[in-house]
Image (spheres, rainbow, N blue to C red):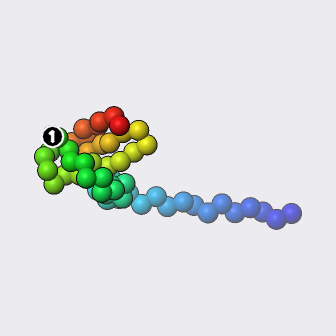
Amino acid sequence: MAEKKQKPKIKKSKKYSVNAEEIKRTGKFCPKCGPGIFMAEHKDRYSCGKCSYTEKK
Ligand SMILES: [Zn+2]
């Protein structure tokens, strides 16, 4: 019987790039942080990675 070896998943903590990966250029800026700070687009909302401001779509 073959033994299944589970590969340990190494989770890299990329604290400050995790949100950057989600950010698409929606052209939507955070109203709190002002122009220049893009908001990350999610399924049903936008969120700012800087101040955590969330806006529903
Ligand atoms: Zn913000």
Residue type beneath disc 1: Lys
Relative to 18, is 7 on the left or the right?
A: right
Q: For mark 1, does the 10 Å Cα neighbourhood hold few (<14), some (14 to 19), or many (20 or more) residues? A: few
The one of 51 and 37 positioned closer to us in this rendering:
37
Relative to 39, is 6 on the left or the right?
A: right
**Any part of residue 18 in sight:** no
Mark 1 Cβ and ligand 1 under 8 Å apart: yes
Above or below, 34 against 55 in this view is below
Residue at 29% from the left image edge and 36% from the top image edge? 55
The one of 7 and 25 positioned closer to us in this rendering:
25
Residue at 78% from the left image edge and 63% from the top image edge? 3
Residue at 14% from the left image edge and 50% from the top image edge? 35
Residue at 34% from the left image edge and 56% from the top image edge? 24
The residue identified by callout 1 is 32
Above or below, 9 against 45 in this view is below
Question: How far across and down, in percent of the image, does residue 19 sit?
Answer: 33, 53
Q: Circle 1 — which element? A: loop
Relative to 52, is 44 on the left or the right?
A: right
Q: Quadrant of the N terminus?
A: bottom right
In the displayed orientation, state which residue is furthest to the right: 1
Question: How far across and down, in percent of the image, does residue 15 sit?
Answer: 32, 55
